[in-house]
Image (spheres, grey):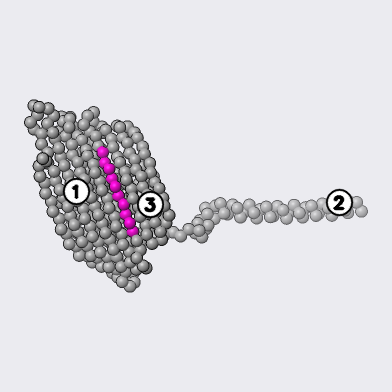
Amino acid sequence: MIATVDRARIAGLAERVLFGSTLLFLVLGALTAGLSPAGLSAQQAQDTTQLKELVVTANGTPTPADAVVSTVTTITGDELRDRGIQFVQDALRDIPGGTVVQSGSYGGVSSFFLRGGESDYVKVLIDGVPVNQSGGGYNWANLTTDNVERIEVLRGPASVIYGSDAVTGVVQIFTRTGSPGVQLDGGAEAGTFGTVNGHAAVLGGTSALSYSADASRHSTDGTYPFNNDYGNTVLSGALRSAIGAASDASLSVRVSDNRYHFPTDFSGALADSNQSSAEKSYSLGLNAGRRLGDRYELRLTGAAARTDGEFDEPSDNAADTAGFGFASHRKRVIMIVRVAHRDSSCPQVTHVEVTICGDGEHPLA
């Protein structure tokens, strides 16, 4: 009898151990599946909505990246900030077929060559605003990545939709806007050559309106032993709104005020203790669009850009009579009307562009 009871107890104990082991195995298996890449992907698929990447520069209207047949490179603002890139020219060094050439130290004249063409063959847009000088040239030394959402580089013959001055490609910079709520962003840093950088930004909005505003300052003593200071103050902002289900509008502005001191003459020798150049640039862009049914979209773009340049070389001493200076003013006002016809996922764009511009230069008083 005693032996029978012991066998029953042992059988019951074995049954409970087996049941507990099976339950533990199932729990551990479920946890392991949840922590595995497949499990995580499944959870993310349920909790996160992945939006398609849109490219604007390729066709002049937002298009899914997988529907673009042109050669386009997109650099996101998050990538720029993660890599610590502060000037757009440094981001362009990684573009296939592109070459950046800068003379001198920080602030020295910088050019971007694309696909073997001249530097004035590349059209530069900031939120749709052309900022090239008359003749097509552009100095990349002062364009910073502050408040940039992304950079799109269109290479090759598809750039013809932006006009005859876009020979080898187009570079377009987009200003970022916020998401619902309010976000504050800022930072400061200091380093070699007397470099001090700082910026502060606010971003936010609602479901129908988003905005951003950013102020930054970059300054350095330069790499030469004297007269090589460089300072650049940048203000930028953007406002975007959805007007109903079929319309949208946006406004963006960017202001840059910089001065670059350089001690070198035309041969590169250190020869001057006080010559400098300065530039103030302004760009303002207004964009409004309305979808006309499923296949057509009407978009109106107004753009204004102005650049005030100055070169000053005061006399170094009483015996120096070669001092001189001059100032230049360049402005451009553009109105663009685009009608986009969407066939499947590939839009065809027809646009009419009217440009009013004026340039001039005069000696400094």
Q: Main secondary structure of the magenta part?
A: strand
Indicate which disc, 2 or 1, sits on the residue closer to the N terminus: 2
- Is 94 or 323 nearer to us in this picture? 323
Please name the amino acid that badge 3 sits on.
Answer: Leu
Depth check, front residue: 180 or 71 = 180
Please tell me whether mark 2 sits on a helix, a strand or a loop: helix
Alpha carbon separation for disc pair 3 and 1: 27 Å
Q: Give how far apart the Cα atoms at labels 2 and 3 are.
A: 74 Å
Which mark, residue 6?
Answer: 2
Name the image quarter holding the C terminus. Answer: top left
Q: What residue type is labelled 2?
A: Asp
Q: Mark 3 Cα within 10 Å, few/some/many (few <14, many 20+)?
A: many
Residue at 33%, 48% (x, y): give it: 214
Residue occupying image coordinates x 22% and y 62%: 336
**Res. 307 mark:** 1
Q: Which mark is residue 203?
A: 3
Q: How far apart are marks 2 and 1 (CA)?
A: 98 Å
Q: Nearer the viewer, mark 2 or mark 3?
A: 3
Q: Which residue reaches farthest bottom?
A: 293
- Residue 60 point in image, percent of width and height: 27, 61
Instruction: State the extent of the magenta-drawn residues as a range.
Output: 231-240
Q: Is mark 1 on a helix, strand or loop?
A: strand
Give coordinates of residue 298: x percent, y percent. 27, 68
Q: Where is residue 97 in the image (x, y as percent from the top left)?
A: 26, 49
The answer to whether residue 47 is left or right of residue 90 is right
Residue 104 painted magenta: no
Q: Look at the picture and state if 135 lies above or below 193.
A: below
CB atoms of marks 2 and 3 within 8 Å: no
Q: Looking at this view, is 122 or 198 the one in front?
A: 198
